[in-house]
Image (cartoon, grey):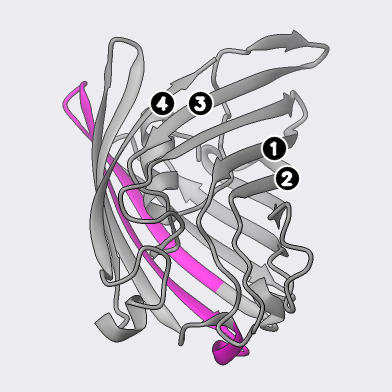
Amino acid sequence: MKKSLFATMVAGAILGSSVAAFADQEPLIPAPEGKFIGTVTFATQYWFRGLKQTDDGTGAIQAGIEYDHTSGFYIGAWGSNSSVTQSPLDPNTAKASVEMDFSGGYRNSFAFDEKATYDIGLNYVYYPGTQKAKYNFDWLDFIGKVGYDFGFAAPSVKLIYSPDMQYESGSAYYISGDIAVPVTNYFNVTLHGGHQWVDKNDRFGFPDYSDYGIGVGTNIAGLDVSLNYVGNDLKKSQCAAQVGGGSCDGFFLTVGKTF
């Protein structure tokens, strides 16, 4: 995500990627041959790959920190409150109140053109306190991303492979495309589209589905503010089974600060 912080936040929010991206920001703590970057964000609703992660009327407080080495290697951690419940095939009563992500990888520009970038990494999604559930809440993602900054627009494509998706639902793939477009010097517009495949849909709780989104944002008094709309192509009856229930789409607002 080699764009301005605002564009990074909007794209991440729409995508539902819970991994914070901090490249090219001022450091929170100077470090030898690298820098630490921190973020704090409030969201009126937490969506991830087109699915709700917090109940209706429950906002999300999210924070992350990342160390970026000058070589391009990075490592980070991110957290949010959550309302995710157990697999529909799990007879136990389990609910995750917190999500924690641990990530690492390597990002850089291609040698032939510094505007062409790539990012290869992994992300482990962990839900404390859910270890008694029949099916594991936690999973590991392997992530690959390429993008190009044309100036007037910055498109990117991301592929995520999960060897054993949430609730032990087997191998899963998520592919998405995003494009960030600056509108004047004050606003950015980000468009998103993605598709999720999962091997064991009944255990996961949803059939394979597509998600989409659009976001508009700006910087106000040093805060990155974005208004986003997200949705998916699931049936309303299927969406009723997700966190919050009922709706397959919705608006949400984010306000964040990078240190």
Circles 1 and 2, Cβ within 8 Å, touching? The answer is: yes
Q: Which of marks 2 and 3 is nearer the N terminus?
A: 3
The magenta stretch is 174-203
Q: Which of marks 1 and 2 is nearer the N terminus?
A: 1
Q: Which mark is residue 102?
A: 2
For disc 3, the neighbor class at 10 Å (few under 14, some 14 to 19, many from 20) is some
Q: Earlier in the sequence, mark 2 or mark 4?
A: 2
Q: The C terminus lies in which quarter of the figure?
A: top right
Q: Which element carries disc 3, helix, strand or loop? A: strand
Measuring 73% from the left and 45% from the top, which residue is drawn there? 102
Q: Residue 77 carries which label?
A: 1
Q: Which of 90 and 47 is in front in this view?
A: 90
Q: Which mark is residue 40?
A: 3
Q: Which element carries disc 4, helix, strand or loop? A: strand
From mark 3 to mark 1, how far is it between C-alphas? Answer: 12 Å
The answer, for residue 46, to whether it is visible in the render is yes
From mark 2 to mark 4, how far is it between C-alphas? Answer: 20 Å
From mark 4 to mark 3, how far is it between C-alphas? Answer: 6 Å
Q: Which amino acid, mark 4?
A: Gly
Q: Which element carries disc 2, helix, strand or loop? A: strand
Circles 3 and 1, Cβ within 8 Å, touching? The answer is: no
Q: Which mark is residue 256?
A: 4
From mark 1 to mark 2, how far is it between C-alphas? Answer: 5 Å
Q: 47 left or right of 232?
A: right
